Image (tube, rainbow, N blue to C red):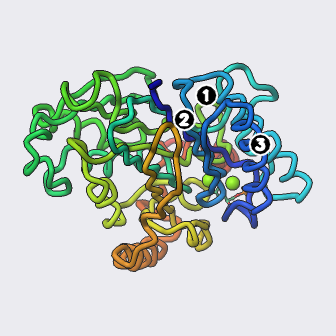
Amino acid sequence: MPKTTVSVIKADVGGWAGHSTVHPALIEAGNKVLGKGAEKGIITDYYVTHVGDDLELIMSHTKGTDNKKVHELAWSVFEEGTRVAKELKLYGAGQDMLADAFSGNVKGLGPGVAEMEFTERKGEPVVVIMMDKTEPGAFNLPVFRMFADPFNTAGLVIDPTMHDGFVFEVWDIEEHRKVFLRTPEEVYDLLALIGAKSRFVIKRVFPKKGKLPEDEPAAVVSTEKLYQIAGEYVGKDDPVGIVRAQSGLPALGEVIEPFAFPYLVSGWMRGSHNGPLMPVGLCNAKCSRFDGPPRAVALGFQVANANLGQPLDLFDDPAYDGARKQATKIADYMRRHGPFEPHRLPLADMEYTTLPKVMVKLRDRFKKV
Ligand code: F6R
Ligand code: MG
Ligand code: MG
C-alpha cells in the first residue's frame, strides 16, 4: 500500500461580493478541473470548498508532498478560476496569482499550501482547518493546545501513549530558519517563541517515536506570507492546517476544542485589525461584518485508501453557538476602539499595509523636538 498524501492548496482568485465569499461559479470551476485531474489519475479524490473569499482545494493522492503534477493541477484550477472571475468581474480577480506562469511548485507563487504524507492507519481521521481574514500565526494557539495543553487535551493526562508528548517544528518567518522543540520538557521555550505569532509559526507537529512511523507529522500548517512574496500588501495569508486525530494523537474532539474559545487573531478589515476568530459551519463561512470577523471552518474526513470520502462540517454544531456569541460580543468591544490600537495592529505589523503611503504624505512636515 503506497503512502497517502493530503494536500490542501488555497488561493483568493476573486471575491463575491467584495472580499466576503467565493462565487459558486468558482467552486464549479474547481470541481471541473479537479474532476479531470482525478480522471487522469493525478489525484485520487478531492473536495472543493471555500472559507470567506478563499477557494480551498482539498486533495488526496499517493504522489507525496511537493508533487509537480498535483501543484500544477491546483494552479490550473486557480487559472481557470481567475478566468471565470474576470468574466464575472468578481472583486480582485486573480488576487493571489503572483506569478504569470507555473514553475514546478505553487509555493512562492501566491497560493497557500499545507500537505502531509502518511501511512494510513486502520482508521485515519483527518481534520482540515481553514481560516479567512487572518495569518498563519493564528494556528499557534490552537495547535499548541491540541498537542501540549492538558487542560485542552485530556489524552495528554489519561492516555499513556500520549505521555511522551510531541515535537514542534517552529519557523521564524522573518529570518527564514526553523527550530524543533520538544514538549512537555521545553514547553516554556516553545511558548516564548510562538506567543509572537506574527513572527514564529508552528509549521508541523510530530509525535515522539513510536506512535506513527518516524517523520510522519500529526499536523501541518501553511506558512506562506503573501506580502513577503510580493514585497507589498497583496491580499492576505489566510492559513490552512491539516491535523490527524485519535489513537495516540489528540481525539477529534480535542483537535477542535481550542476553537470553542474565540481567541484574538490579527487580520480582519484590511489585514490591519485584531479580532476574535469565529468558528462557523460552511453555511456561515462568509466574512461580512467589517469584512469579518475572521472565521474558521473545520472539516472532518475519514480517509480510506487515499480517498477523502464525505466531509463532516465540524463547527456546524450548536455546541459552538456559545463561541460564536462570545465572538460577536468581542467584535462589538474591539470595534468600539475604531482606528486605535490594540484593535488596529501595532505599527510594525502595519508596515505591509497601505498605511505607510499615508505616512509618506506627512514626512516633510515633522520638525525636531
Ligand atoms: C482582503 C480583506 C479586505 C480588504 C478591504 C479593502 O482580504 O480582508 O478587508 O482589505 O476590503 O479592500 P480594497 O483595498 O481592495 O478595497
Ligand atoms: Mg479577497
Ligand atoms: Mg481571504
Q: Earlier in the sequence, mark 1 or mark 3?
A: 3
Q: Residue at x 86, y 51 (%)?
A: 84
Q: Nearer the viewer, residue 159 or 307?
A: 307
The CB of the residue at mark 1 lies under 8 Å from ligand 3: no
Q: Which residue is mark 3?
A: 33
| Label 3: element kind | helix
Q: Residues within 10 Å of mark 1 (few under 14, many from 20)?
A: some
Query: What whole-number distance in Å separates the C-alpha atoms at marks 2 and 1?
Result: 8 Å
Q: Amino acid at mark 2?
A: Glu
Residue type (three-letter) at the residue carrying disc 3: Val
| Ligand 1 lies in quarter | bottom right
Q: Which residue is mark 2?
A: 224
Specify which label sits upstream in the sequence, 2 or 1: 1
* The quadrant where residue 169 appears: top left
Which percent across, then down, holds residue 212? 27, 30
Residue 204 percent across, percent down from the top left: 36, 33
Residue contact between numbered discs 2 and 1, judged by CB atoms under 8 Å: yes
Residue 328 screen position, x and y as percent: 44, 77
Secondary element at tag 1: loop
| Image position of 3 (left or right of 190) | right
Q: Nearer the viewer, residue 123 or 172?
A: 123
Residue 355, can we see it?
A: no
